[in-house]
Amino acid sequence: MNRLLAALIILALVIVVTWALWQRTNAAEARADLAEQQLAESLQREAQHQVVINALWANARRQESQRRALAQQQAALTRTAANRLTTIEELHRENDTLRAWANTRLPDAVSRLRKRPAVTGAAAYHQSVRDAEPLHPPGQPTDH
C-alpha cells in the first residue's frame, strides 16, 4: 500500500511538473508571438516613416532646385534692369528733348498718386477708398 501511495504521489508530482512546464512553454510561446507581432508592426511603421522621409528629401531637393532656378532668374532680371537703366541714362545724356521732358514737374494728380501709401489688404483698401478725395463730375473745375 505504501508503494502504491508513493507511486501515486510521484505520478501526481510528475503530472503537476509536466503541467507547469506545459503552462510555462505556452506562456513563452505567447510572449514570442507578441514580440514577433510587435516587431512586424515596428518594421511596418519604420517602412512608413522611411516613405515619409524619402518624400521630404525629394521635396527638399525639388525646392532647392526651384530656389536655384529663381536665383538665376532674379540675377538675369537684375542684369536686364541694370542694362535698361544704363540705356535710359545714356539716352538721357544724349537726347535733349528727353532730358527736358524728364526734368519737368509731374502733374499734381500723378504726384498725389505717388504720395499715397501702398494698400495692403482688404481693410486698408476700404479705408483708402473711404478717405479718398471725392471725384468731381466732368466739366466742373477742381479745387486746385
Image (tube, rainbow, N blue to C red):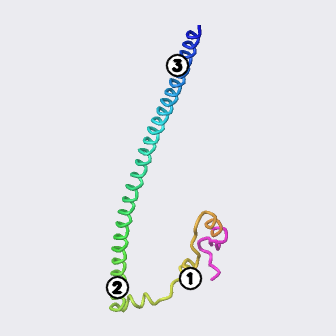
Return the disc, 2 or 3, that comes first in the chain's sequence.
Answer: 3
Which residue is rendered at x = 49% and y = 31% of the image?
28
Which dot marks residue 71?
none
* Amino acid found under the numbered disc labelled 2: Thr
Is 140 one of the magenta-colored residues? yes
Return the disc, 1 or 3, that comes first in the chain's sequence.
Answer: 3
* Relative side of 72 to 43, left or right: left
Which dot marks residue 108?
1
Tell me whether circle 2 and circle 3 mark residues in contact (CB < 8 Å).
no
Residue under label 2, please give it.
86
Residue under label 3, please give it.
14
Quarter of image, res 91: bottom left
Q: Secondary structure beneath disc 2?
A: helix
* Amino acid found under the numbered disc labelled 1: Asp
Mark 1 surroundings: few (<14), some (14-19) or many (≥20) residues within 10 A: few
Principal SS element in the magenta part?
A: loop
- Distance in Å between CA atoms under marks 1 and 3: 113 Å
